[in-house]
């Protein structure tokens, strides 16, 4: 049985003019995908009116709480003593959201109680999928 953690949080969308708009979000982690964390956004705050989830490495979140991290579609970096920026890069542009660092730190600590960082594995499902892909027997 897999364990799923969810933690509602508030974020601040930083606009191109420096204005900050409140955005609700939910931090989510599941033991079914131990290396990943998810940030869920409700439909009313997205461009297409659909609920949106961004998934990225849990290790990236941990690194970004200490210093700038990430080179791809998601980047995380401290933004002063109490906030952390998470940048989402997409074809439509870049969204920069400020999260309370305490919320992210608490969430990350809770994920470690479910699966320790050194116990993250790709799991039997991936092994079986690779064997099947390459014509072996499971």
Image (spheres, rainbow, N blue to C red):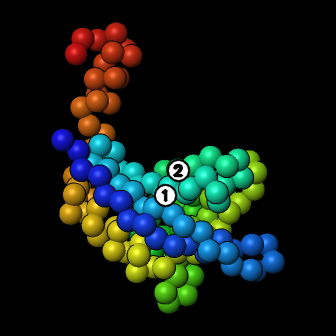
Q: Nearer the viewer, residue 76 or 49?
A: 49
Residue 25: x, y in percent? 51, 64
* Mark count: 2
Rendered position, 130 above or below 60? above
In which quadrant of the rendered view does residue 89 lie?
Answer: bottom right
Q: Is residue 55 left or right of residue 44?
A: left
Residue at numbered disc 2:
53
Q: Quadrant of the N terminus?
A: top left
How far separated are the C-alphas under marks 2 and 1?
6 Å
Q: Judge by depth and name the residue closer to the eye, 100 or 128.
A: 100
Residue at figure coordinates x 62%, y 46% from the top left? 50
Instruction: Examine the image and state in which quarter residue 62 appears.
Output: bottom left
What residue is drawn where x is 34% and y is 10%?
135
State whether residue 22 is above or below residue 73.
Answer: below
Q: Which residue is mark 1?
A: 39
Check contact, mark 2 vs mark 1: CB within 8 A.
Answer: yes
Residue 54 visible in the shown view: no
Would residue 138 be visible to someone looking at this image? yes
Q: Position of residue 6 (x, y in %)?
A: 36, 60
> Circle 1: is it few (<14), some (14-19), or many (20+) Cα within 10 Å?
some
- Outermost residue toward the front in this view: 44
Residue 116 in the figure: left or right of residue 69: left
For marks 2 and 1 on the same chain, the one whose residue lies earlier in the sequence = 1
Helix or strand or loop: what does disc 1 sit on? strand
């Amino acid at each position: 049985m897999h364990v799923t953690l969810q933690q509602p949080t508030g974020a601040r969308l930083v606009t191109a003019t420096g204005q900050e708009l409140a955005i609700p979000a939910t931090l989510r982690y599941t033991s079914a995908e131990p290396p990943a964390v998810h940030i869920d956004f409700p439909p009313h705050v997205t461009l297409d009116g659909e609920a949106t989830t961004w998934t990225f490495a849990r290790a990236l979140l941990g690194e970004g709480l200490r210093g700038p991290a990430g080179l791809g579609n998601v980047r995380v970096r401290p933004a002063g003593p109490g906030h952390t920026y998470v940048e989402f890069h997409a074809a439509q542009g870049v969204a920069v959201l400020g999260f309370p660092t305490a919320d992210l730190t608490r969430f990350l600590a809770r994920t470690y109680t479910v699966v320790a960082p050194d116990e993250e594995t790709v799991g039997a499902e991936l092994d079986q999928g690779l064997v099947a892909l390459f014509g072996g027997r499971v």
